[in-house]
Image: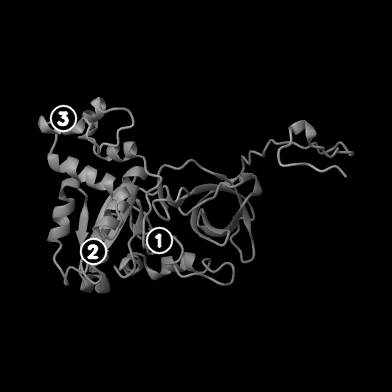
Amino acid sequence: MRRYGKHTDEDDIRTRPNRKGNRPRTHIRPKHEDAAPGLVLTVDRGRLTCLVEDRVVMAMKARELGRKAAVVGDRVALVGDLSGRKDTLARIVRIEERASVLRRTADDDDPYERVVVANADQLAIVTALADPEPRPRLIDRCLVAAFDGGLTPLLVMTKSDLAPPDELLELYGALDIPYVVTSREGLENGAAADLVREHLDGRITAFVGHSGVGKTTLVNTLVPEDRRRVTGHVNAVTGRGRHTTTSALALPLSSAEGGWVVDTPGVRSFGLAHIDPSRVINAFPDLVPGTEGCPRACSHDEPDCALDAWVAEGHADPARLYSLRRLLSTRERKEGD
């Protein structure tokens, strides 16, 4: 029997003939023009929960997609049994182009980036003002990921009954980020949800934050129980189930404008190995004209950066440049620094 090494030419590979001649082998994939559109709500052990019209459908990725993975928020095309009945399974045959992507790496030395949520319009960064203490470096990293991925950030500060928000508001004031301040009582009685909901209608919003800040409690109050049940029973499609804080889950808002919230697992770190500084500065349109004189591949945080002289000439607020550089330099700083 002939053996092949690791480096064989295509001419060395023996192909199996098709004796019947009725099914020639081909690399042309089916177009699936009749595939139904759907939205990925959650992913659990290779099974994807999708919304097809008003039905919740279980699906798995078609082999023809190769290593391309679908994530929560993806718009997909499905074929097969789309009835949503128990013990049925559809196939995802196409993942549509993404409008935005929230990505992270395990740490700053990890070259492998992970897509957390696709097609979100907004990133709600939830932080407690006390118990646990705020982590500005983590907030900075989430902001960088939002700007890099094309999401609008929203800062949600909880537990204002334990500490005032003044210090954080001063730190992020130059960024002009919309924000909401809530109290622990507000999280419990639903008043906090009403304040936050004003920023969510008609949008897809991903929620991030580390454990203990009240993120999932807030999401639970934003989404009525009957709507949680729509996706809750399929979150255990494998028979084992998962809590919503261990895997991302998209939930529909009950409002005239519609909208979705995506609850993501609590984060301990937010690696930024994948970040391109040129994408981050696009979130500072008032500073972009000043980069025309920058050297090639300028990080905008180095001695030869043209932004220094441009801002000194009065073209932009120095606080804005300071904020940009603080965010860019967070890639070199640990979150606890």
Pair 2/1: label in front = 2
The quadrant of the picture occupied by the N terminus is top right
Neighbourhood count class around disc 1 (C-alpha, 10 Å): few under 14, some 14–19, many 20 upward: many
Q: Is residue 12 above or below residue 54?
A: above
The quadrant where residue 20 appears: top right
Name the spot of residue 81 as percent of width and height, x first.
Answer: 64, 56
Q: CA distance from mark 3 to mark 2?
A: 34 Å
Q: Which mark is first along the chain, 3 or 1?
A: 1
In this figure, which residue is indicated by the disc labeled 3? 310
In this figure, which residue is indicated by the disc labeled 1? 264
Viewer-nearest residue: 317 or 121: 317
Identify residue type, mark 2. Pro
Q: Residue at x 10, y 29 (%)?
A: 313
Pair 1/3: label in front = 3
In this figure, which residue is indicated by the disc labeled 2? 134
Name the spot of residue 163 as percent of width and height, x first.
Answer: 15, 69
Name the spot of residue 160 as percent of width and height, x first.
Answer: 17, 68
